[in-house]
Amino acid sequence: MSAVRITAYGGAGQIGGNKILLEDGPNHIFLDFGLNFEDSGKYFAEFLAPRTSTSGTYDYLMLGLLPPLAGIYRADAAVEELDPSAWRIAKEATGYRDDVGLLGVLASHAHMDHIGLISLLSRDTAVVSSATTAVIAKSIQDTGAGGMQAEVIYGSDRQESDQVLRSVRNADLNRRPWLVTDHANWSPAAVEFWKHSPRAKGVLEAHDADPFAGNLGPLAVRSYPVDHSIPGATAYAVETSEGWVVYTGDLRTHGRRGDLTRRFVEETRELRPVALVCEATRAGSTSEKPHSEADVRARSLDIVRQEEGLVLADFGPRNVERLLNFLEVAEETDRKLVLLAKDAHLLAAMGTAQRGVPDPGSDDHLWVYKDRVGQTAAWKKRVWERFANKIVDWREVRQRQGDYIICLSFYDLPRLLDIDPPGGSYIYSTAEPYTEEQEIDIERMRTWIERFNLKFVGDPKSTSQEDQGFHSSGHASQDEVLEMVEEISPAMVIPVHTKDPARIAQALSDSKIRTEQPKTGSPINVMGS
């Protein structure tokens, strides 16, 4: 049996939730450690959530939503009386082990289906990522709802009382070890942001993010920036005793930085990898060229030019390319592009580690929305103070609706009740729904849109040409994936992050490249030549 094995504990026959264990003898590395929305959605919904803050890992282990690997999770996340019950269930699951010596996690990018369960790993577990991924992850945690599941970057210790976990009163917020692949981009502003506490006072304890030295334990690791719908996306190669194993994370070639992906392909080809763990989200998609960000910009500009009233743009500002598109549209139509406070916080964070990120403080067409609020979180007050000269109050938007493009998503829709538009356009420029719950959200969104007489542009359920071209996928098409695989020419390819790995196997059936279709918890042996 080979000493090198790859086991998918998430992302096998699924889109997202990548948790891929790479082992070389006693050395173990996870390639991402994300939350799988499909599996989690079978049990939980918006107001039905796992009780991580009081029960730690218990709910997840009982429902089979965490890898059944004893010894890798937070010591303060176990309820002593209940923990044996959870592990009795875990021991019956495929892939149970108690011998994993985890050296760290290679985080490909800051989408929750890739980093969302890092919070439950031992607090000593190091995470490797790009500088941009690190600051995005912190911004998401700073502005989020909190709780143990959100503690990707920092958190406070828990202690058990009456079989319930409780936060230690007045405890410091401590960070886990974080290693940055492109530490040259870790600016003084990033250092300041990293140590800043989301609380009203204080700083985060423990060390700053450190430069990644190029290895986890005895295993050499190389990192490669790639193009995806979120900045900072990174692919990795790990040198094992059988040869190089390459992991793509999520990537594409049709974005503004498709050159990064092409360079990654060229450089990893020279490694002659024994295995390529490759995303194949769009396996089975048509061979048509995917819409580019230039297509999205052109289609959105047409809509905004025709619209006299309010325009709402539904996209994630983590997608900086999409943000730049809408910023250009705002400039050409003489409108203000208005972000919510959490999105302004995110842009400010990204700007500490990456050039070219728009800044509300200096861009004439980029503004920050001020809600009708009661009690306000400390982080939001800081955002409004920082951009005090670029604030747009909800009453101003209500009075002059044709002057604005407001960035809103599904969860922000109640703000429409304050703006009260008599009409306008809602441009849906985000990912197509993959799950039943997301499809339900689209129907709820449609109800809001109809309530305010808005035109629904880019409806993901529409087959009309008028609704096409408002979203550029963050993922390579099947043809693009196959071209990358054939150029890299690994001995073996393992398709992950896809519902249809058989499509890749079928397409490569006449190739010298062997395809292994992963099954959750079942190891795949990796043999060198």
Image (cartoon, grey):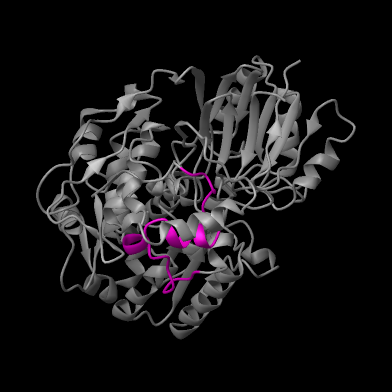
Residue 144 lies in the magenta-colored region: no
> Residue 278: percent from the left, percent from the top?
66, 36
The reply, left or right, for residue 300 in relation to residue 368 is right
Q: Is residue 42 above or below residue 144?
A: below
Q: Residue at x 70, y 36 (%)?
A: 494
Q: Pick whichever, 287 or 504, lies toward us.
A: 504
Q: Using the rendered image of the protein, determine whether residue 232 is visible from the camera's viewpoint.
A: yes
> Residue 138: percent from the left, percent from the top?
31, 45
Q: Quadrant of the N terminus?
A: top right
Q: Quadrant of the C terminus?
A: top right
Q: Residue at x 67, y 47 (%)?
A: 290
Q: Residue at x 75, y 40 (%)?
A: 479
Furthest-bottom residue in this view: 451
Labels in figure, total:
0
Which quadrant would residue 192 be assigned to in this image? top left
Q: Is residue 101 above or below residue 424?
A: above
> Residue 507: percent from the left, percent from the top?
84, 39
Q: Using the rendered image of the protein, determine whether residue 356 is visible from the camera's viewpoint.
A: no
Tell me the magenta residue range.
44-70
